[in-house]
Image (cartoon, rainbow, N blue to C red):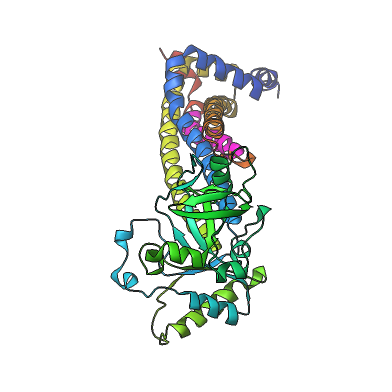
Amino acid sequence: MSSSSPTQPVSRRFRLSWTENVRFALVAMRAQKLRTFLTLLGVVAGVATVIMMVSFVVGFDRSITAAFSSFGTNLVQFQKWEPRFGDDDEMPEAERRRKNLEIDDARALKRLATLAAAVSPERYYFRPITVSSARKRANNPAAVGVTPDYLAANSSSIADGRFFTDADVRHASRLAVVAPDVVEALFPQQDPIGRTITVETWSFQVIGVLEKKGSFLGGSANNLILIPITTFDEQFPDIRNGQGDTLHIATVPRRTEDVEGLIEQGTAILRARRQLRPNQPNDFAVFTSVGQLKNFRQITGGIAAVMILIAAIALVVGGVGVMNIMLVNVTQRTREIGLRKALGGTRRDIAIQFLSEAITLTGIGGAIGIAIGLGVALLARVVFDFQAAAPLWSVLLGFGVSTTVGLVAGLWPALKAARQDPIEALRYE
């Protein structure tokens, strides 16, 4: 009993607290600045990549969600071509041979689709056109031929003036409803209602202005000129005859839960009108906002997976660097380890000391990586007006991953240090 009692206070005296271990770790880092910097690079790069990836994916997701919401989350659009983001040259031949959708198809949907709250046949002219008033010109707005159901089907509303009536469409009136960008270009300081604009060589009277909406992927709902679809067919007969973009039929359900039912109902009506047999595939496409949103999220998910892989590689490299520097530290501090053990330090004390140094090292690297990632996200918001955002969980994840790397990478060096024989360690030169 008497022989063991003197060692107990000595052991407690040389058992360092976590705070003291962290302080010793910082001293060691300052003493080896270059080696510390090179070791931290991998951890910093990995954590910064994680934060930037999450920020950009969240920002992109918010942007596309807002964009699709502005065009209507319940939109169900029937069209000739399958939705795609690649070159039209990649279109299969069978798709090229499809029959155009017609105005009569839209009328049939409006008459027979009981789940549809609105049915809007639309034609688009995306080629550059001249839209002017007096000596001012608009910035190549897209011309769209529409019916009175356009507003309800596209989640749009009128900011000033009025929209088209059935009589306007029947009489192919030369009336126009313009979007905010057109108003800003042609009538920056004037009320556009009642004024005359020229579309190519045709004159139109402005009767309404659309509410401002969002933009996405280079396209904008704020740079449009809407005219009755009958007037559109007279001015741009090549579109009606199937050249370029063809008729789109936009619909919305009466209730949100009726989206799938409307798709089935509309598909059945169009298949019957196009005389398709039960074993034949649809010769038209169905576009939905929800479906496209899922597609975009799959793309962002793939990008995120690749970036996570890159971040993981950087963290592995950083972890190897941390393990290497800690093994070197163990070798260089062998006599210190022997001295601590001779003064009562236990294996646990030695292991905790070296583990805390490794975790401190990677924790600082993680904090620097988080700062860099947040800085890049903030820069994207300020310079590019991109709504990048890093949620709190991503910051905690980045810091947690960095400290975990330190724990894993420092485990072997810590165990190696703890297993040192105190007598051999004291003799080490």
Q: Main secondary structure of the magenta part?
A: helix
Looking at the rendering, which quadrant does residue 349 occupy?
Answer: top right
237 or 218, nearer to the observer: 237
Residue 177: x and y in percent read 58, 55
Residue 205: x and y in percent read 57, 54
419 is higher (above) or lower (below) than 9? below
401 or 395, nearer to the observer: 395
113 or 289, nearer to the observer: 113
409 or 305, nearer to the observer: 305
Looking at the rendering, which quadrant does residue 261 occupy?
Answer: bottom right
Residue 175 in sight in this render: yes
Residue 17 in sight in this render: no
* Residue range of the region highlighted in magenta in the rendering: 395-414
Query: Which quarter of the rendered picture does the C terminus lie within?
Result: top left
Residue 74: x and y in percent read 60, 64
From the viewer's perspective, is 74 left or right of 103?
right
Q: Residue at x 63, y 66 (%)?
A: 165
6 is higher (above) or lower (below) than 323? above
Query: Which quarter of the rendered picture does the N terminus lie within?
Result: top right
Q: Residue at x 52, y 53 (%)?
A: 225
Residue 297: x and y in percent read 51, 54
Residue 405: say if magenta.
Answer: yes
Q: Residue at x 42, y 46 (%)?
A: 306
327 is higher (above) or lower (below) than 47? above
Figure disc tally: 0
